[in-house]
Image (spheres, rainbow, N blue to C red):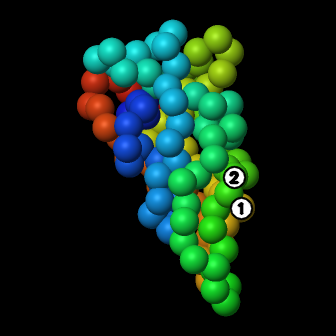
Amino acid sequence: MAKVLITGVGALSCVHKFPIPATGSAQLTVGGIGVLTRSVVLNTVPACTVPVSQGITPCTKVASMDGAKKLTVGGDPVVLDTEQGTTNGADGALAPTITATPLQPKLTAT
């Protein structure tokens, strides 16, 4: 089973390895720390400061983010470490994917 993502530096990062500083929900927490939901991640501005050069542009928004099928907070799917997401940035031939890193081992979902 996949791990639920919680608020924390490094939970989500863009293709350039800069954080996506989303704030977790106060309605569902793990160890007192809010879990990340799809709509919050979609409305978070990445902290990407990669310099613009040929084929490289910084990430300025989250373009897409999947969410859990069965676990929601107020109808908003939580984000799992196995979910797929993209930003609007570019890094040559690399896809602008979001990297998810679980910061807690306790809560899992599908």
Q: Percent from the top left, x then y, of residue 39?
A: 68, 31
Q: Which residue is drawn at 52% across and 19% down?
A: 25
Q: How many labels does the image show?
A: 2
Q: Residue at x 27, y 31 (%)?
A: 105
Q: Percent from the top left, x then y, of residue 28?
A: 47, 13
Where is mark 2, residue-wise? 61
- Can I make out residue 69 in this image? no
Q: Percent from the top left, x then y, of residue 74?
A: 64, 11
Q: Quadrant of the N terminus?
A: top left
Q: Percent from the top left, x then y, of residue 57?
A: 66, 74
Mark 2 lies on a secondary structure that is loop
The residue type indicated by label 1 comes to Asn
Left or right of residue 37: residue 61 = right
Depicted 15 relative to depicted 78: above or below: below
Upstream in the sequence, badge 2 or badge 1? 2
Q: Which residue is drawn at 31% across and 37% down?
A: 103
Q: Do the residues labelled 2 and 1 touch (CB within 8 Å)?
A: yes
- Can I make out residue 32 in this image? yes
Where is mark 1, residue-wise? 88
Q: Quadrant of residue 44?
A: top right
